Amino acid sequence: MRTTRRITWLLLGVAACAPGADATGPDRDRSHLIELGSQIIDTRLVRPDTAPASTTGDGYVLVKFPGPVTAAQLQALSASAQIYTGLGASWTGVYRPGYKIARGAADLAALAPADTITVMATVFPDADVSRVAAAAAQLPGATVVGADAGQQVSRVRLRVAGADLAAATSALANLAEVFWIDVEGRRQLLNDTTIWVGQSGLNAGMTTPVFDHGIHGEGQVVGYIDTGIDADMCYFRDTARGLPPTNACDGGTTVDLNQRKVIGVDFLTST
């Protein structure tokens, strides 16, 4: 990305064929494609913009080269206020709002109208991130939860009601300062196969024979050997009884069977 006379070029250089592809095979020439995270642009079907400065208000332009951009091409492009085929570019086009919205955001707008979605708007480094945050805060169903100005790019993070997601991402994409819009993946524990795989293996029809025999772990004490355990962490902490007994391995073992999970901790030494 480079700014020259209020026009920012987004340089795209691709090889004629994907690595390892057969150049003689059908449709192996990829030099006409721009593969974005939102869509694939076929430059054979999209008419190039020959005067980008007059066709968009934000001044951001895609510049497509048929191969890796050379230093000479980059220097010539930096010195030009227009895009000429003499510079070696095979296609140029305005960076349109529709190019900015990730496929995942568009899919969720249709699939999760009842959920609240976390949206991340990436802002150009030379843009005012506070202006984007202020505009995002006015969107229906949206709440801004963070805005960070970085050296490379800036970001605005917001929570959006699923029913308003399509309208919100569209409005964000129309802001000149916004470069990219995506949704954050939801963090969740995936442990749906561990129980039956551990009890019956992969080929027993997802059965749980241990549970079927009434064995669930109640009243059982299991020894665990490791370099150490944090008995005060949230998974083990007993807020009523405090920490479990600690024993040196050569000094006997004291346990507290009333502890929530850890009944005793043994160490090699007393320190």
Image: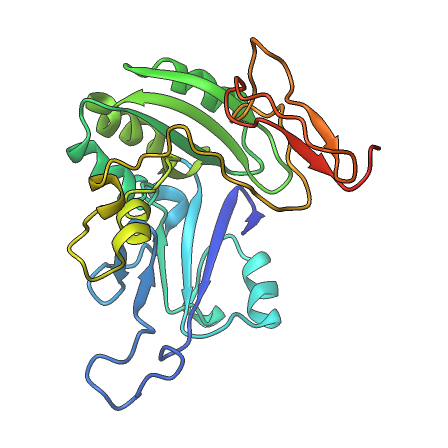
Residue at the far bottom in the pictured view: 24
In the picture, residue 141 is in which quadrant? top left
Residue at 26% across / 91% down in the picture?
A: 24
Instruction: Name the residue nearer the viewer: 49 or 147.
Output: 147
The quarter of the picture where residue 103 lies is top left
**Whether residue 42 is situated above or below residue 54 in the rendered picture:** below
Q: Position of residue 185 (x, y in %)?
A: 37, 38
Query: Measured along the vertical axis of the image, is residue 168 above or below residue 215?
Result: above
Marker count (numbered): 0
Q: Could you tell me if residue 176 is visible in this image? A: no
Residue furthest to the right in view is: 271
Nearer-the-camera pick, 238 or 220: 220
- Percent from the top left, x then y, of residue 259? 54, 19
User: Quadrant of the image for the C terminus?
Assistant: top right
Q: Is residue 41 left or right of residue 256?
A: left
Relative depth, front residue between 132 and 160? 160
**Whole-percent x and y of residue 237?**
56, 20
| Residue under the image location 53 percent in, 41 percent down | 6
Residue that lies at the very extreme toward the top in this rendered image: 240
Task: Pick the residue in front: 172 or 69.
Answer: 172
In the depicted structure, whether residue 37 falls above or below residue 256: below
Residue 207 image offset from top left, x and y in percent: 19, 49
Residue 223 shows in this picture: yes
Residue shown at 15%/55% (left/top)?
205
Q: Is residue 61 left or right of residue 167?
A: right
Q: Please name the residue shown 82% across and 38% down the image.
A: 269
